[in-house]
Image: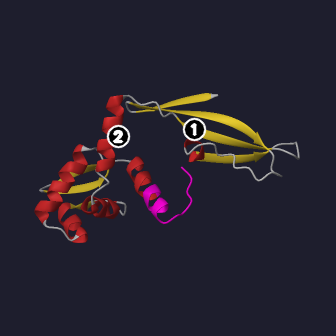
Amino acid sequence: MTNATQEKKYPVAEETTTKKINPTLNLNPINSAVDAINLAPTNTNDANTMTVKLSVLDASLSEEEYDRLTELFKQFACNSRLKILFRLTLGECSASELAESAQMSQSATSHQLKDLKLARIIKSRKAGKQVFYSLDDHHVLNILKIGKEHLRGEHCCV
């Protein structure tokens, strides 16, 4: 069974497969790192088997998509940008508030904000002469949350 979802212009497909395993054996039902994305165990009527639903992310990307994804992840590879992004998880704020919380100069903060905005990781809105920034969408929040949980060894569900 295959479900294809589309968000903006970036297609993401999920394939859900069902595998039966014998719970009395000490076998790992995860055959690859991709299988581990979403495990949803369900019991069957048969006492000797358990059905495990594996959600597999479609790994077929074009070269352009790999390049774009690489550029996206590069934005998360900078300490200063991460400080800005984690501050924005608390809500919208101005460039001067971001500079203060990240302990950066106004000029350095503006440079980082420009890069994050070009990558569509943050968005801005103008109110008079002041510009306020926020995370672009829930995907950015999820990337930060999952990264933090991975770092701390916490288990999370996508």
Residue 140: give x, y in percent of width and height.
38, 50
Residue 25: give x, y in percent of width and height.
80, 51
Q: Residues within 10 Å of mark 2 (few under 14, many from 20)?
A: few
Which sits in the foreground, 113 or 65? 65
Residue 54: give x, y in percent of width and height.
64, 41
Which sits in the foreground, 136 or 2? 2
Residue at which label 1 appears: 56
Kindly identify the amino acid type of the residue bearing the numbered disc 2.
Leu
Say which quarter of the image contains residue 132.
Answer: bottom left
Kindly identify the amino acid type of the residue bearing the numbered disc 1.
Val
* SS assignment at label 2: helix
Which sits in the foreground, 5 or 35? 35
Residue at 23% x, 65% y is 98
* Quarter of the image with the N terminus in it: top right
Q: Which residues are magenta?
A: 146-158
Q: Residues within 10 Å of mark 1 (few under 14, many from 20)?
A: many
